[in-house]
Image: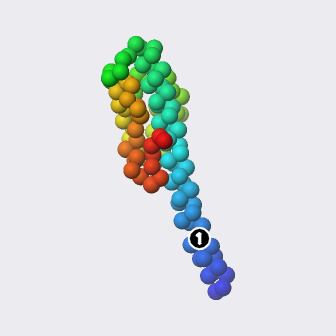
């Protein structure tokens, strides 16, 4: 009986910390994806002669400028958020729909 109580206590401590670490890891991965998207947007706009305020076609314009995942597409947000792109020259140029999430999925 005591062993079961100790195991339950340890689970009560470990599980919330594990969930918090998982959420932080997903946010960090998403932020790194946003940075890669931002760099890809800058490279594309320079090579294509885009000007401030021009739009970017998602994802076809950026596919050549970013490392694709195993499925051959731009890596998505690991927490299920969606990426939106702003116009060329707007900071940040890529945003995640989970920017109000805790921890936030947004570049600093």
Say which residue appears at 40% left-offset and 46% top-offset: 99
Report the residue that reaches farthest toward the bottom.
1
- In this picture the colour scheme is rainbow
Report the residue that reaches farthest toward the right.
3
Q: Is residue 88 shown left or right of residue 38?
A: left
Q: Position of residue 58 (x, y in %)?
A: 37, 28
Q: Is residue 84 shown left or right of residue 35?
A: left
Above or below 4: residue 69: above
Helix, strand or loop at mark 1: helix
Above or below 65: residue 11: below
Say which residue appears at 45% left-offset and 55% top-offset: 102
Q: Position of residue 16 (x, y in %)?
A: 54, 65
Q: Position of residue 20 (x, y in %)?
A: 53, 59
The foreground one among 83 and 89 is 89
Q: How busy is the neighbourhood of tag 1: few (under 14 within 10 Å), some, or many (20 plus)? A: few
Which quarter of the rendering shows the N terminus? bottom right
The foreground one among 74 and 46 is 46
Mark 1 sits on what residue?
13
Q: Is residue 27 visible?
A: yes
Q: Position of residue 42 (x, y in %)?
A: 46, 23
């Amino acid at each position: 009986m005591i062993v079961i109580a100790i195991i339950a206590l340890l689970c009560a401590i470990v599980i919330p910390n594990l969930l918090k670490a998982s959420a932080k890891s997903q946010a960090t991965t998403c932020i790194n994806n946003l940075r890669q998207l931002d760099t890809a947007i800058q490279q594309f706009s320079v090579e294509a002669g885009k000007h401030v305020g021009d739009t970017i076609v998602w994802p076809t314009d950026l596919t050549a400028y970013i490392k694709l995942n195993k499925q051959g597409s731009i890596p998505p947000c690991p927490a299920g958020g969606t990426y939106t792109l702003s116009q060329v020259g707007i900071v940040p140029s890529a945003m995640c729909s989970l920017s109000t999430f805790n921890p936030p999925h947004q570049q600093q």
